[in-house]
Image (cartoon, rainbow, N blue to C red):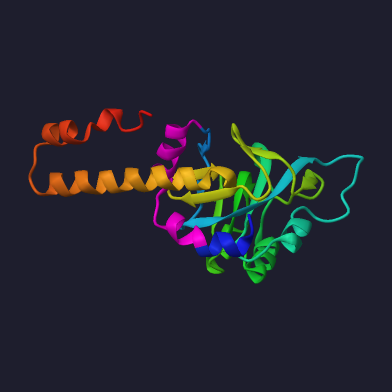
Amino acid sequence: MEREIFDKKYRKRLEKLSTTNLSDALDKIGIRGAVIGIRPLFGLPKVVGSAVTIKITAAGMAKSKHHLGIEAIASAHQGDLIVIDNRGDTQNNCWGEILTCAAKMKGVSGVIIDGAARDVDMCDEMGFPVFSRGVVPITARGRIMQEDFNCLIRLGDVQVRPDDILVGDINGIVVIPPERLDDVLFEAEKIMEKEELMKKDILSGFDILEVDKKYNYEQMLKK
């Protein structure tokens, strides 16, 4: 999807929705898209963007031409998200201050890591959202390296392709195929609207059993 079309037609709509709304919508239309266990390392950020992917492997006899992440950042467009597959490894760092500085200058929205980061205090100071499974102080050098970028990866048990749409907030991460974005948004906005009506009724004094019956809450995701 062209970045200009995405920004004009979809970005603001996605920013209004929580990952819980979007996860429910993905469930309703039968797409596995919710990533479990990757959360923001500070604050309450909301990130939305197209994926620029990085695949990490162990360091060894084969060498990488560049430090991990450099090529992905160079290829990124404003508003994109860097998405790193390090197989959930929380013992090795694959993101830090220098990469954050470069990504921030490119207008990247944030980084999502199936693994660990470091220099988190500096990332916070620069206002650059970092989502990961943990934090470590050690360098990546001699331990891990970039295997490829802008390639097929996974976050947990969810497939991520270059240019897939990702949304992250305090609840976690969701991955949305661009070709199903209209369907996901339609369902997510319906879910959000119904839940807002339910909250309004509850806060107006209606009994929760009445509200449950009125909105058929348990069956909300049935096709």
Q: Quadrant of the N terminus?
A: bottom right
Residue at 77% across / 52% down in the picture? 68
Relative to residue 146, is residue 45 depicted above or below? Answer: below
Residue 132 on image: x %, y %: 57, 47
The one of 189 and 78 positioned closer to us in this rendering: 189
In this rendering, would 213 be left or right of 48?
left
Residue 183 on image: x %, y %: 47, 43
Relative to residue 15, is residue 199 depicted above or below? Answer: above
Relative to residue 171, is residue 43 depicted above or below? Answer: below
Res 95 quadrant in image: bottom right
- Which stretch is magenta? 9-30
Q: Is residue 133 visible?
A: no
User: Magenta span: helix, strand or loop, mainly?
Assistant: helix
The one of 74 and 145 positioned closer to us in this rendering: 74
Relative to residue 37, is residue 119 depicted above or below? Answer: below
The one of 68 and 29 positioned closer to us in this rendering: 29
Q: Quadrant of the C terminus?
A: top left
The one of 130 and 218 positioned closer to us in this rendering: 218
Q: Is residue 189 visible?
A: yes
Q: How many marks?
A: 0
Residue at 74% across / 56% down in the picture? 72
Res 156 quadrant in image: top right
In this rendering, would 208 be left or right of 105?
left
